[in-house]
């Protein structure tokens, strides 16, 4: 195993080095409010040269994979793009630095109610729950340092081990057998810091009664905060003068804070007006060849449509993908396979196109062929964290459980050895959930007696429907709208303007997915809509949605659906979801 891991790590190093030696020419246009931006600055990381866009907003620049290209213009917000293996065209739409309305600058209030903070706790890692209410580290008058569950080392024996070397200026004494204390060099007065554990305040009672709550299972901790400033510790009185360590455990968090999919729409009173286009309405804007396919009265007619369009679109990867998907869905696997094999050079070196093909193949039930495609993506992108999760789950789908477990083990090893970046915003929690689920349901097929008997609390409390969204193009921007049975909605924005840090993190670490958990208590018919914003090229994006029912139980099952996104800036319906039923596209 060590030899295999070393070989894989070496492959990643060689692949990354090879990519860095290939200079890419990247071109596109820069626009703002649909007009060209002339004389915008374009700078590549590691260089001092600054290029300017032309009068029509066009530009051309050379960069290596992994470089960051910065686009800037006075009064507009800078945009940073990470160059990937497939980056060729980047059409940049810039946005203002401030929001203006009738020449009056509108700024969001920094004051937020406790209800607002409670509502956002599950999705905002900067919020901590104390005995005296919620605090937002980004808005607090005093500094708050927070450690989240995906940053906590689960192998720590107790909270003392967990705290060591994680916070500057913190001194830990004692051990996990006899107990101990934590001191801060930044406290208002000397002495051991006190603990606030799910609202219960624990303080030192004397030299023989150390206060550290060493009984807490580190795996059950959701969030840890260290507070030293008077602004944040004044509520604790003299006890809090040396500083306060706040711990929120998973078991101590209830209701909307539990990390399940929060029905935030009801709290915000957003009413859905049934104004999303249906899939049938949307199809009117599809390419002519897709409309001709769908209007075909027989398979022979559809095959004639393919042959008639082949000369026109012979160099289009999307014609290949769309045609392949159409004939797969019609049960014409052999014809679809022939289309792919004859046109493979169009896509076989491009991970974005291969992922789209893998999505459709998987949705059609040809799991072995999908596995082969995911293996090709892995070879092209061994330094993308998404590649490990995709291939592991693909192995699992064809019942190669040992290979699936091995892939997750390789991922964890490479992260621990810094060959792969650790994840704090996106895919790490998904991989943890999937690998735990694998061992809980199929562990006996991985190794004798291998089923997980004691699972982490955060993976056993969920009861409901899990949705995993994956997109083939990392440049894709969109907004997902979740409409509850009462017609209230909540929107998750995957756009550069609204979620810049998240998108930058995805590009640097190599992932493009997000999960949503709908608790069983939120029963009824849900509607999921999407507003596609584009992908910086004039190409469609392919979205895969995997819906898991009875997640974590022996009766667990999943459904895979794929959607072609091309019409921009229009909210349209993806599917309906019953809390215990199936996905119904319309």
Image (tube, rainbow, N blue to C red):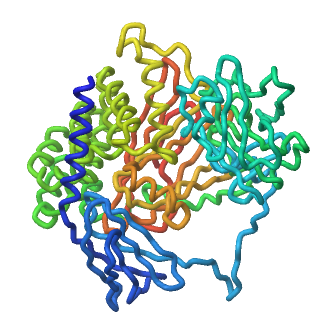
Q: Is residue 468 left or right of residue 385?
A: right
Q: Position of residue 270 (x, y in %)?
A: 70, 57
**In this rendering, does residue 36 appear at all?**
no
Q: Position of residue 570 (x, y in %)?
A: 49, 66
**Does 403 sit above or below residue 516?**
above
Q: Residue at 37% across / 56% down in the picture?
A: 474
State the residue in front, 254 or 412.
Answer: 412
Q: Residue at 83% across / 40% down in the picture?
A: 131
Q: Position of residue 162 (x, y in %)?
A: 60, 32
State the residue in front, 459 or 534.
Answer: 459
Q: Residue at 40% across / 60% down in the picture?
A: 476
Q: Is residue 297 left or right of residue 339?
A: right
**Does 155 sit above or below residue 100?**
above
Q: Residue furthest top?
A: 449
Q: Is residue 110 left or right of residue 313?
A: right
State the residue in front, 27 or 472.
Answer: 27
Q: Position of residue 33 (x, y in %)?
A: 48, 82
- The answer to which image quadrant residue 361 occupies is top left
State the residue in front, 146 or 114.
Answer: 146
Q: Residue at 15% across / 47% down in the picture?
A: 340
**In this rendering, does residue 517 appear at all?**
yes
Q: Residue furthest bottom?
A: 55
């Amino acid at each position: 195993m060590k030899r295999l891991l070393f070989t894989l790590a070496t492959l990643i190093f060689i692949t990354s080095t090879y990519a860095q030696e290939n200079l890419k020419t990247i071109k596109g246009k820069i626009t703002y409010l649909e007009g060209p931006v002339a004389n915008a600055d374009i700078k590549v990381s590691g260089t001092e040269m600054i290029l300017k866009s032309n009068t029509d907003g066009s530009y051309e620049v050379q960069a290596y994979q992994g470089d960051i290209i910065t686009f800037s213009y006075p009064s507009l917000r800078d945009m940073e793009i990470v160059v990937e293996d497939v980056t060729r065209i980047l059409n940049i739409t810039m946005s203002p630095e401030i929001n203006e309305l009738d020449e009056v600058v509108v700024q969001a209030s920094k004051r937020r109610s406790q209800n607002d903070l409670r509502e956002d706790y599950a999705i905002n890692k900067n919020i901590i729950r104390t005995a005296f209410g919620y605090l937002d580290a980004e808005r607090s008058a005093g500094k708050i340092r927070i450690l989240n569950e995906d940053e906590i080392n689960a192998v720590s024996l107790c909270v003392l081990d967990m705290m060591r070397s994680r916070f500057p200026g913190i001194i830990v004494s004692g051990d996990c057998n006899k107990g101990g204390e934590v001191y801060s060099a930044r406290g208002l007065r000397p002495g051991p810091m006190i603990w606030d554990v799910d609202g219960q305040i624990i303080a030192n009672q004397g030299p023989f009664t150390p206060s550290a709550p060493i009984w807490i299972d580190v795996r059950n901790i959701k969030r840890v905060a260290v507070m030293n400033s008077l602004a944040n510790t004044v509520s604790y009185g003299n006890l809090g003068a040396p500083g306060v360590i706040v711990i929120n455990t998973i078991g101590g968090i209830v209701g909307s804070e539990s990390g399940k999919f929060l029905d935030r729409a009801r709290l915000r009173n957003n009413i859905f007006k049934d104004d999303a286009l249906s899939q049938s309405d949307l199809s009117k804007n599809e390419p002519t060849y897709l409309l001709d396919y769908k209007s075909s009265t027989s398979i022979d007619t559809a095959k004639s449509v393919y042959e008639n369009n082949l000369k026109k679109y012979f160099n289009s990867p999307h014609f290949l993908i769309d045609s392949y998907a159409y004939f797969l869905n019609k049960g014409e696997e052999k014809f679809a396979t022939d289309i792919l094999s004859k046109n493979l050079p169009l896509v076989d070196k491009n991970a974005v196109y291969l992922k789209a093909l893998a999505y459709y193949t998987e949705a059609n039930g040809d799991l072995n062929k999908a596995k082969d495609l995911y293996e090709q993506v892995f070879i092209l992108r061994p330094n993308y964290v998404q590649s490990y999760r995709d291939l592991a789950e693909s192995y699992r789908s064809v019942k190669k459980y040992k290979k699936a477990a091995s892939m997750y083990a390789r991922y964890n090893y490479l992260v621990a050895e810094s060959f792969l970046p650790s994840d704090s915003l996106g895919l790490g929690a998904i991989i943890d959930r999937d690998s735990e689920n694998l061992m809980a349901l199929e562990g006996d097929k991985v190794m004798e007696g291998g089923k997980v008997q004691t699972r982490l609390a955060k993976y056993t409390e969920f009861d409901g429907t899990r949705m995993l969204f994956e997109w083939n193009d990392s440049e894709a921007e969109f907004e997902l709208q979740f409409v509850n049975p009462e017609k209230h909605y909540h929107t998750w924005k995957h756009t550069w303007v609204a979620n810049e840090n998240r998108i930058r993190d995805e590009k640097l670490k190599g992932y493009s997915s997000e999960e949503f958990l709908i608790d069983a208590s939120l029963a009824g018919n849900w509607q999921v809509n999407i507003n596609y914003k584009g992908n910086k090229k004039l190409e469609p994006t392919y979205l895969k949605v995997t819906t898991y029912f009875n997640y974590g139980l022996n009766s667990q099952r999943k459904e895979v659906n794929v959607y072609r996104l091309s019409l921009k800036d229009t909210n349209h319906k993806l599917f309906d979801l019953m809390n215990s039923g199936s996905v119904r596209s319309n």
